[in-house]
Image (cartoon, rainbow, N blue to C red):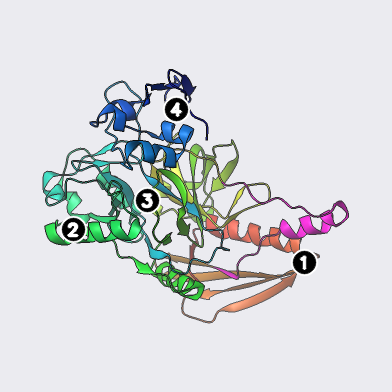
Amino acid sequence: MPDLNDGESIEMKGSGSKPYVLKNVGGVYSCSCPAWRNQSLAIERRTCKHLRKLRGDAAEEARVGGAVAVRKANVEGEAKEGPPLLLAERWDRLADLSGWWMSEKLDGVRAYWDGKQFLSRLGNLYHAPDWFLDGLPDVALDGELWIDRKMFQRTVSIVRRQDKNDLWREVRYLVFDAPAHGGHFEQRLKFFYEILADRRPPFAAAHPHVLCKNLDHLHEELARIEALGGEGLMLRQPRSKYEIGRSSTLLKVKSFLDAEGRVVGHKAGAGRHKGRLGALQVELADGTRVDVGTGFSDAERADPPPIGSLITFRYQELSEAGVPRFPSYVGVRDDVELTALPTPPKTTTAPKAKVASTTASSVPSLCGKRYFEFVAGTSSKFWEVSLSGNDITTRWGRIGSAGQSKTKTFKDAAAAQAQADKLIAEKSTDGYVEKAP
């Protein structure tokens, strides 16, 4: 890793308009960012993400004695720096996670407790009432402000308020790590379980973790959580340290992926949604635009997120061109930044075979069946589509009945996929909502 000799300095781009200056003076490293300046530690024991990026986590942990510096909220007029959080990578579906610690991925709001207050990933203060904070220890904790499954937007609407009202009684703080403890994960797990059991805060609890037995156990638990309406799973590598930034020691496992995009337009609805929102036109970090037309409630279609707002949407996979397939609205976000989507894998086949392999790879599987329901007034209908080679099979009828089915054969798999995409888009526009098959 690069380093600075005594007396040297270097500039590094940060979240502010001006670059930050990193220095080494007599073996004491410093950074001009607010996160480094506002720490209450002695200057020789301070660190930040910029120094870690330059020197590496191991070098910085050795220098400061393994201490994780707790960052404070920004002062007026300065760029905000988020707390020193461990962020997850996506599971590549290849690594064997037997023996890893498994927990439910919560669809709440990530919150860093610095011993006195809750901070968002971007360093914003959550104005929790004093009674909500009763019993919380004066040590750093990492967790999620959470109400229940499928209650993400409700959670956001409560915790972003600044009037400290009684709506916070719906919320719980579920703790899944102790960043400043310094030990490996099993030691940190024991620490926060014991301290919360001892202090018994009325609105906080330890988030349950179990050991993953094998991949069958992983898939069974994922199916169980998703059937209950949960997001997925988090897997933590045994005996891993708490690293700042993205790390492969923490993996998220989901059937669907999440992304953020900026709303740049509203498309009018048709049919049942005439006079209301049909789809949001959303721009991704790389400038790609995608229409998000499903996942909305009737109230959200009547009063959609304004242009310029940042939203989270869920999608099944990326096309070969890097465009999210089957995007579905989740909610408005103000606690995350717009980041690039993962790059889709590139084909490496020989030129002669490339035409055939590209055609196949450009037709992602529907992953079995896609099932949708429409419920309004006295209407209660389902619609299902499945793809097998050149054949599309659709099934429809009243919910609870066997319904009717029809199979149609196309000239090739690409044509079948295109027709399936068209049908799904039409049903989504008509108000059908995707459900677990």
Tell which circle, 1 or 2, labels the residue nearer the N-terminal end. 2
Q: Is residue 436 among the parts visible in the rendering?
A: yes
Find residue 396 and report its horizontal and vertical position in percent.
56, 73
Tell which circle, 2 or 4, labels the residue nearer the N-terminal end. 4
Q: CA distance from mark 4 to mark 3?
A: 39 Å
Query: So how many labels did they put on this image?
Result: 4
User: Residue 299 bears which disc, if any?
Assistant: 3
Q: CA distance from mark 2 to mark 4?
A: 36 Å
Neighbor class of circle 2 (other Cα within 10 Å; few <14, some 14-19, many 20+) is some
In this rendered view, identify the residue nearer to me: 395 or 116.
Answer: 116
Q: Which residue is found at the position 35% from the left and 40% from the top? A: 84
Find residue 129 and report its horizontal and vertical position in percent.
15, 44
Mark 4 residue type? Gly
Q: Give above or below for 409 relative to 234.
A: below
Disc 4 target residue? 14
Disc 2 target residue? 196
Magenta range is 342-370
User: Residue 24 bears which disc, if any?
Assistant: none
Mark 1 residue type? Phe
Disc 3 secondary structure class: helix
* Tag nearer the camera, 4 or 1: 4
Mark 3 residue type? Ala
Q: CA distance from mark 1 to mark 2?
A: 60 Å
Q: CA distance from mark 3 to mark 1?
A: 39 Å
State if disc 4 and disc 2 touch (CB < 8 Å).
no
Find residue 247 and report its horizontal and vertical position in percent.
46, 49
Tell which circle, 4 or 3, labels the residue nearer the N-terminal end. 4
Neighbor class of circle 4 (other Cα within 10 Å; few <14, some 14-19, many 20+) is some
